Amino acid sequence: MIEQVLIGSVAGGTCIVFAGLGEIVAERSGVINLGTEGSMLCGALAAYAVGIETGSPWLGVLAGIAAGAALAAVHAALVLHRNANQIAVGLVVSFLGIGITALFGQSYVGQGVVPLDTWDVPGLSSLPFLGPVLFEHDPLTYLSFLAVPLSVWAIWRTRAGLVLRAAGEGPEVLEIYGTSARRVRWIALLVGGAMAGLGGAQLSTAATLNWSEQMTVGRGYVAVALVIFAGWHPVKLLGGAYLFSGAIALQLQLQAEGWELSRYLLESLPYVTVLVVLALLSRRRIHGGPAALEKVFEG
Amino acid sequence: MTVLDAPVPVEADAPPPPPDDDGGAGGLAARAAGLPAVVLRWAIIVGSTLAIFSAFLVAKGADPLAVLESMWDTALGTPDSAGETLIRATPLLLAALAAAVPARAGLFNLGGEGQLLMGAIGAIAVADRLGGDWPTVPTLTAMAFGGAALGALWALLPALLKVATRTNEAISSLLLNYIAGIIVTWLCFEPWKDPTSLGQAYSRELEGPERFPVIWGQRVHPGIFVGLGAAVVLWLVLRRTTWGFKLKVLGGNPAAARRAGLAVGGLSVAAMVVGGAMAGLGGMIEVAGTEGRLRPELLAGFGFIGFLASWLAKHDPLKAVGASIVLGAIAVGGSGLKITAGLSGGAVNILMALVLFAVLGWGSRPAGAEGR
């Protein structure tokens, strides 16, 4: 049973890992993006639809990335050029994503998906316990394993990462050294949206294998919550995402085994878990966030 | 650009003009004629949002004029449809107030959705308790208090977390929406399931003294007046009382508020709780008026649309009335979209988002809720 829960945790957590990593990039540059939910939805539909139209799941994944970034561009334009409130615009961007996917997704409801096939890692997948949990997944899940250490390296060990963090900590300083904070934030938001789109693509073409209206049911918002929870750190984000999806997997598993516990109590478990951990960690985390997060900076 | 500083006009209440795409051109003509800046501004907003929405419809292969016409007919074209818009706008208005009061204090209440649902639950719990023994007015009053109390309680959680542990209230209130939704589903499927419902999951129908009377057409009930009353009272409270002024100070500059000796924690909690009570009242009105019972999809999306209405109104309770009617009309228009054009009703979210973008992006930063 533990094995089943862990498999479900990794499979279901991948989309949140991508979306959360994207949100870390955006927030490290000083912009919070609640439009992540919308970017995920658009990515999920774009990947699903393009996969069906072209027969190639990988073209679908590319389309998902592009769709997520396109939606984030709307957020960037309003927040960075019109100084509009980040939380409000983010929510509206998510609404836009819901609307667009409702309009264009309707004809794809119930159509057969072109799935991203599971790809067992040769050798490693035959390991006892660890094999099925970690090495019998779709290729995007393996990509998420790589993306976490890669983003740690990129944020703390590269010049681009330094500039990114500077935009979030002290945009004035960045401007003094001749780099436009607005430009850095544009790039960060586009990267963030692209990753949310990638997460959505994984969700529709590898995890749930279908498309339905508002199928992300708040996973984008959960990703934003987990970023705070993780103290803006990719490794802790990975833990948070697996905790959330693990709670979902545990809930499904307990139901399948016919436990007497109320199914509704179990269904609320993932959200309660995130909320409780968030509350427990917030006191310590409050100084961990980028100093200029949510602040308007006119460069 | 003097237009930027123009106050949001009460004309915001005006329904969108009949479907046509020449709003932009009309706007230029208005400038030439020297019309007030506000008219020009709204002409541009309405014209450009309809134009972009039409572009989406064309991309989908639908005829935008036919779609907009059917939306207009469904939402405002006949007295019955206008009534439908009014009863849709009522919970939206109260959800908007739920966002507006905390926003004055610089807080984001994204939990309107859950607070509406808890209000509906509270109202039904009180009705069950009374068992139809009291006359209409006391019954409805007690239900209103029950709804407001539970809505307030649901807003108290993120408020306390914010004050005690500095948990981001936007995120915690948002997560609580999903938990409230699960509670409603549970009630509908298990303890409150209507025994006569034959497999359908919903609660028993409220009846007799537990329901608002229909005052107009088939469905219009006096709930809208409750909403209007709440808006006027809050407008007065925010504008005329020291409490309202303290909230504004806190929202404008928390550091200054703290230095001036304001009880920041208490004010924050109070603002969230008052907001939650408003949404709770909205949930009560929905079950005691329009719906009559609890069902799993009840009020889905209303809390978020109410949040948008609050921003559309720049957190002014009176302007929120107009904003709720506009967004309510768009939401009702979604049914027209579905019936006549065969499109998904969810597509109207595009139109709502575009209106909001136009207002949020226009440049003037709304009072309150500026960076924290």
Image (spheres, helix red, strand yellow):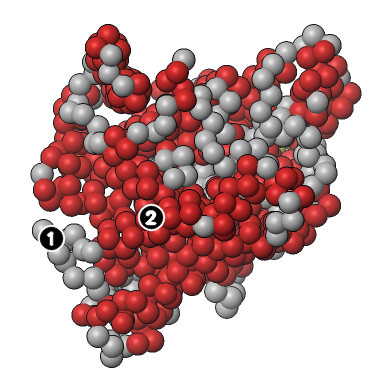
- The answer to whether B213 is drawn above or below residue B87 in the figure is below
Q: In front here: A110 or A122?
A: A110
- Kind of residue at badge 2: Ala
* Residue A143 shows up from this direction: no
Q: Residue furthest right?
A: A157
Q: Residue at x 89, y 23 (%)?
A: A157
Q: Position of residue B78 (x, y in %)?
A: 10, 44
Occupied quadrant, residue B292? bottom left
Q: Which residue is mark 1?
A: B216
Q: In front here: B49 or B98?
A: B98
Real-space Cα separation, disc 1 to disc 2, in angstroms: 22 Å
Q: Position of residue A281 (x, y in %)?
A: 79, 55
In screen coordinates, is A145 left or right of B279?
A: right
- The answer to whether B158 is drawn above or below residue B190 in the figure is above
Q: Residue at x 52, y 66 (%)?
A: B152
| On-image quarter of the N terminus of chain A | bottom right
- Kind of residue at badge 1: Trp
| On-image quarter of the C terminus of chain A | top right
Q: Residue at x 16, y 47 (%)?
A: B81
- The answer to whether B207 is drawn above or below residue B321 in the figure is below
Q: In front here: A221 or A110?
A: A221
Q: Residue at x 42, y 40 (%)?
A: B313
- Work out whether disc 1 and disc 2 sit on a shared chain: yes
Parent chain of label 1: B
Q: In front here: A184 or B336?
A: A184
Q: Which mark is residue B231?
A: 2
Q: Nearer the viewer, mark 1 or mark 2?
A: 2
- Rate crowding at label 2 as few (under 14), some (14 to 19) or many (20 or more) other CA atoms within 10 Å: many
Q: Position of residue B182 (x, y in %)?
A: 49, 64
Find numbered disc 1 in the image and state the secondary structure of the residue it sits on. loop
